[in-house]
């Protein structure tokens, strides 16, 4: 493992653009979203300013934009990834307690979970046509879209499970149960693997997208508060996890195990 960026104040949501080698994260202390290039070219820069310093922020990417759920503003917001428009734009407003957001690259739909309604919602990429996808999503902690298989996955901290359904909400089922505080979830679509963080157990695990072959990737993370993780694919699978102050990276081959942290 290696530290990617150090000396941060209060990092929250994190997102990776693997093809371009760009890492984005929100910081609740300075109220900005930052970007850094993983190859070391270019200095750390703020691409979005004026966040509300919410109690929870999650990030997602589409082709040109950053999208995030703002729990305190009760909104889904967006901004251009290149930093040309540093002020956030409202995508969906008057929500209850949105806490997780994901994007389907094929349909260009935006999905989010809501602690208040205990449902999973979606809208078009311009924020129009909002609708309920899963009317009983309960407390969805983190959401990821599998555009290849047309599936939606989310973790539920309260029920200790990962759930799966079709992108239109049909065929909802608990996929993996008996977890210890599941929070952030990430997807390697080509490999057909799910990765997730279990806060209570202090570990990162993975499984096939059909819920089989559950295994530990990293254990004994101690008291690290794992806010968010995102998985990007290049020649290796790269897991990024935001700990209390320093995001760190873990490079994994398709079948590798790293053991303890």
Image (spheres, helix red, strand yellow):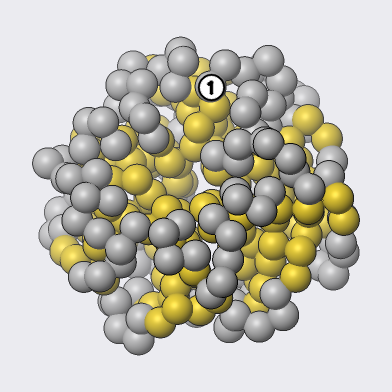
Displayed quadrant of residue 129: bottom left
Q: Where on the picture, by quarter, is residue 45?
A: top right
What secondary structure is found at the residue carrying circle 1? loop
Q: Nearer the viewer, residue 240 or 79?
A: 240
Q: How many marks?
A: 1
Residue 189 vertical position relative to residue 85 in the rendered view, above or below: below
Q: Position of residue 94 (x, y in %)?
A: 12, 41
Q: Is residue 65 visible?
A: no
Q: Is residue 209 above or below residue 85?
A: below
Residue 158 falls left or right of residue 96:
right
Camera-side residue: 139 or 110?
Answer: 139
Please name whichever residue, 40 or 163, is drawn nearer the observer in this view of the structure. Answer: 163
Quarter of the rendering occupied by the C terminus: top right
The location of residue 226, given as percent across then percent down, is 60, 41
Q: Is residue 246 visible?
A: yes
- Left or right position of 70 against 160: left
Residue to which mark 1 is pinned: 10
Q: Residue furthest bottom?
A: 171
Q: In this rendering, would 209 be left or right of 37? A: left
Q: Residue at x 28, y 76 (%)?
A: 168
Q: Is residue 97 above or below residue 138?
A: above
Q: Position of residue 128 (x, y in %)?
A: 15, 54
Q: Identify which residue is drawn at 16% across, 45% down.
A: 95
Position of residue 109 measured from the top left corner of the image (x, y, whole percent): 31, 60
Location of the N terminus by quadrant is top right
**Residue for point 78% across, 30% down:** 3
Q: Residues within 10 Å of mark 1 (few under 14, many from 20)?
A: some
What residue is at 28 percent from the left and 51 percent from the top?
Answer: 115
């Amino acid at each position: 493992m290696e530290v990617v960026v150090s000396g941060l104040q209060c990092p929250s949501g994190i997102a990776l653009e693997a093809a371009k080698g760009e890492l984005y994260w929100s910081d609740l202390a300075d109220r900005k979203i930052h970007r850094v290039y993983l190859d070391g070219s270019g200095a750390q820069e703020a691409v979005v300013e004026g966040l509300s310093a919410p109690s929870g922020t999650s990030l997602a990417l589409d082709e040109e934009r950053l999208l995030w759920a703002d729990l305190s503003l009760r909104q889904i917001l967006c901004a251009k990834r290149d930093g040309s428009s540093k002020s956030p734009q409202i995508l969906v407003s008057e929500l209850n307690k949105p806490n997780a957001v994901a994007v389907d690259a094929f349909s260009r739909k935006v999905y989010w979970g809501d602690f208040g309604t205990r449902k999973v919602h979606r809208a078009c990429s311009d924020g129009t046509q909002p609708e309920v996808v899963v009317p009983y999503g309960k407390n969805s902690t983190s959401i990821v879209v599998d555009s290849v298989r047309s599936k939606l996955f989310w973790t539920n901290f309260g029920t200790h499970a990962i759930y799966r359904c079709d992108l239109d909400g049909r065929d909802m089922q608990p996929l993996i149960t008996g977890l210890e505080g599941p929070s952030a979830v990430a997807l390697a679509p080509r490999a057909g693997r799910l990765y997730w963080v279990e806060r209570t157990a202090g570990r990162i695990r993975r499984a096939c997208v059909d819920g089989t072959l559950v295994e530990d990737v990293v254990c004994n993370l101690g008291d690290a508060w794992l806010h968010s993780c995102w998985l990007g694919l290049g020649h290796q699978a790269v897991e990024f996890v935001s700990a209390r102050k320093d995001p760190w990276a873990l490079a994994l081959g398709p079948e590798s195990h790293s053991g303890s942290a």
